[in-house]
Image: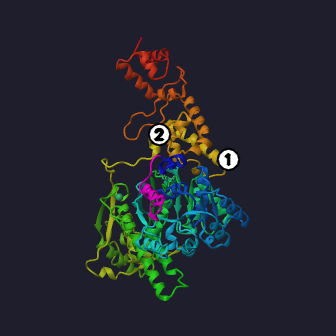
Amino acid sequence: MNARETLKVYFGYDSFREGQEDIIDTIISGGDVLAIMPTGAGKSICYQVPALLLPGITLVISPLISLMQDQVKALNEAGIHAAFINSSLTDNQISKALSLAARGVYKIIYVAPERLESFEFLDFVSQVDISMVTVDEAHCISQWGQDFRPSYLKIVEFIKKLSKRPIVSAFTATATEEVKEDILCILSLINPHVVVTGFDRQNLYYSVEHMKKKDDFVIDYVEKHPSDSGIIYCSTRKNVDNLFELLFKRGVSVTKYHAGMNTESRKKSQDDFIYDRTPVIVATNAFGMGIDKSNVRYVIHYNMPQSMENYYQEAGRAGRDGEPSQCILLFSAQDVIINKFLLEKKDFSGLSDEDAVLVQQRDYKRLQIMEGYCSTTRCLRNYILTYFGEKTSGPCDHCGNCHRQYKEVDMTAEAKQIINCVAETRGRYGLVIVLGTLMGANRARLRELGTVNYKTYGALKGHSETELRALISQMIAEGYLFQTEGQYSVIKLGDISPLRDENTRVVMRTFEEKKPDKNKTVRKRSTDSLTASGYDLFEILRKLRLEIAREEALPPYIIFSDKTLIDMCVKLPADRESFLNVSGVGVTKLDKYGQRFLDAIHTFLDTHPGEIVSMSDDTDDKVFDRAEFNRQRNRPESAGASWSEEEDNMLDQEFHSGMSILEIAKLHSRTAGGIRARLKKHGLIE
Ligand code: ADP
Ligand code: ZN
């Protein structure tokens, strides 16, 4: 078997994606590889396909237990013998796995880096032929990255201990230059072929929403996308608990995850989410490492994360299956304040003073870049790509900013009035009093406090309250003002020195939504090609998948991805051979599950005769050819079956085009009598 056949037979895919073939070819011909590919690009295939073609065993070093287990389950489902060795197994289980491995049962073995030193493991590798060592999440070797794992440094010594140097391949999604250099150097790759594929995730739609009422936004969004799976990240446990309560009370099928919960309930939440029992999860950033769930349709950040690195990783958990997905960041001025506060509180014990200063500077820089993402009016995708060192061409037309027309208004004069007013209050009053005073409101409370006698009383009379509120929040975010926490929150002056410089401006942005550019390709979800009836079939297949998942105790996406189910609805396979043409169906899965899905499709078509299930993407042509389907199944359809509107229209057209009743009947796999009756009903014949 060659690489392409292996891809088809085991994984059910027809073609390689960008970078995959190049990497696989290099490995098969004996070369080392470093591959930098974004999440969801398909890194696993790049070492799993060669592992099947190389003579010996491939060891995959991976940092996360859950990730290993997931991969091994998926491989076994695809008919590939694989095992993992990590601390979740007992000593007994490990010995057993290793003895099976020594007998050549497994082609691929996932192993935690700590294991590489164990005597038992070293003994095992001395008895077998190791063709390749694959380092997954290779950035963990670099101290520059945020996921540095000291145990990764042991990989090199381990490789040196092997009697024959294996091929070494390393994979990561982290693209910064320092990390790349570290991997190349520390792993001592020999003449490595370095493959960097585009960092862009074209199926992700980025947007930033500036707002205060985040709860309303989240509720509205979740309720408008009831059948979608999504993650909502919050910066604190308290936020997670509150938001979870709110959604739960409204009847949303939701779960939550944060480090304050005990291990058991965390595991349960995670499983409920992965197994699609609760499609929505509210979580802190403790959640997500090693989550491979492929059908996450949206990731909402309730708070601004601390760095672009964090954001890209968390948001990147959306749309691993390549389907269009949303990454929405909800921003409020308060986020900046909280993040600064967290950085100030950060514990630097264990670091020298010098290092602590460096780390702190780096953190502030990262925070600034994140703030920049939230305030830019330019293309958000390009902002991200530029930060990660990638070249960009024009705006993407697939992000919130590209679909907005921003207007900038100079509010410097108004900002100065606000500062004067806060100065007059001597920082004693809250937002309501400050606003009321500036707008010259006629309120007893203002007379009581004496703010009606301020110079700034009524100074901003012509402005709307909403506008002034927005300006004040922006001034808080920019540090000119400062709002205290707690129930009796007051507004104080922040650092106003920049405004003493005449050239400093306070600019407020407003925007109007623009229509997407029609000339650019609109990214569609695969489900877009399904008709209402197609959705019904999709639902039936999803239910069947869930049923099988329960029987097998596997996450549903390991059985088949959503994409594969949708492809079934589009292709409507009638037999085993055509079932194998569905993307994501390999030989083992065909044998295991093929018949049940084929039966479900048959039953659906029998009970929904004449219904159109899908329409092709680019044109509005009907794809479903019932005559062809029946020919495949050798089952002529009964004449009395109901007629869909589409088939009716077709019938009329065919009649007017001069076709004979017999010809039309053949085309529709119906009897001539049935067609005649229908034409009569349309008043076309007597
Ligand atoms: P990564 O490890 O790079 O984040 P994965 O290896 O998990 O990505 O792959 C992401 C998804 O893409 C998986 O569902 C995988 O089955 C699918 N995939 C990988 N290669 C291909 C391919 N050549 N054709 C179609 N789907 C693919
Ligand atoms: Zn854009």
Secondary structure state at the residue bearing disc 2: loop
Identity, as a three-letter code, of the amino acid under mark 1: Glu
For this orientation, the residue located farthest to the bottom is 353
* Magenta stretch in the rendered image: 14-38
x, y (%) of residue 219?
52, 55
x, y (%) of residue 138?
50, 68
Question: Is residue 280 in view from this perspective?
Answer: yes
Q: Which residue is mark 1?
A: 551
Going by the image, does 206 lie left or right of 413?
A: right
- Seen in the picture, residue 534 relative to 207 is either above or below; the reply is above
Residue sitting nearer the eye, 485 or 451: 485
Is residue 346 one of those drawn in magenta? no
Q: Which residue is mark 2?
A: 530
Residue sitting nearer the eye, 209 or 35: 35
- Please say which color scheme the image uses: rainbow
Residue sitting nearer the eye, 443 or 48: 48
The answer to whether the beta carbon of the residue marked 2 is less than 8 Å from any atom of ligand 1 is no
Marks 1 and 2, how far apart at CA: 28 Å
Secondary structure state at the residue bearing disc 1: helix
